[in-house]
Image (cartoon, grey):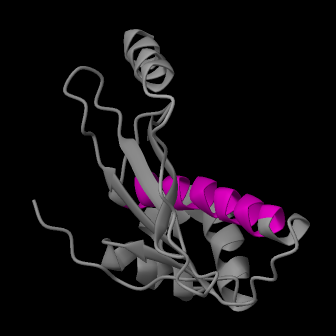
Amino acid sequence: MDVVERILRYLKSTPGKGILFSNHGNLKVEGYIGADWVGSKDDRRSASRYFTFLEGNLVTWKSKKQLIVARSSAKVEFRGIALYVCELLWIKNLLSDLGFKQNETMSLYCDNTSTIAISHKPVQHDRTKHVEIDRHFIKEKLEVGLISFPFVRSKL
């Protein structure tokens, strides 16, 4: 809460400042997602992080600690991706309500090749049964061309 108050004080003290959004001439929506499996040393819970660009401008970002301890990195990634795809659907609907037609596939860049492979293949693996619902939700959005999963290498 201290950080929120600090941000609000800063915004209040700088009334002439703002955030500049550039017009690049397209409505391309791109997102980046990552997760740290058992990243917290205290309770071994993972965190999902994502951010979204619209026309090259940062419009949303989030970092959320997951409510459960994940037993696999696939579960962490799928949970984060499923929640993020819901946000991308909200952005698409918001753009539509504002009169902007967004027909391009939204790119969701992911650094986990196993998660990308499982998303595209309908084969159920023994080690990923616990992510079945999220996998079906994501697969459905891939099949209709709403999202795509380009791989992006992450560097530490």
Residue 118's spot in the image, x, y percent?
48, 79
Looking at the picture, tell me which residue is in the foreground, 57 or 147. Answer: 57
* Quadrant of the rendering where the C terminus is positioned: bottom left
Q: Residue at x 46, y 74 (%)?
A: 56
User: Nearest the camera: 60 or 129?
Assistant: 60
Q: Position of residue 7 (x, y in %)?
A: 42, 22
115 to the left or right of 85: left
Residue at image point 61% right, 53% down: 83
Relative vertical location of residue 141 with respect to residue 58 in this rendering, above or below: below
Question: Is residue 125 depicted above or below 155 in this figure?
Answer: below
Residue at 80 percent across and 61 percent down: it is 94
What residue is drawn where x is 34% and y is 83%?
A: 151
Q: Is residue 132 above or below residue 71?
A: below
Q: Which of 128 and 13 lies nearest the eye of the viewer?
A: 13
Q: Main secondary structure of the magenta part?
A: helix
> Which contiguous range is marked in magenta?
74-94
Which residue, as the protein is rendered here, is positioned at the far front?
A: 16
Quarter where residue 41 is shown: top left
Considering the image in quadrants, where does the N terminus appear? top left
In front: 107, or 77? 107
Image mark count: 0
Q: Residue furthest left?
A: 156
**On the picture, is 115 further left or further right than 24?**
left
Q: Position of residue 69 (x, y in %)?
A: 40, 35
Q: Is the residue 153 above or below the residue 13 in the image?
A: below
Q: Quadrant of residue 2?
A: top left
Task: Point out residue 126 in the picture as x, y percentages from the top left corner.
Answer: 47, 69
Within the magenta stretch, is there residue 80? yes
- Residue 9 highlighted magenta (yes or no): no
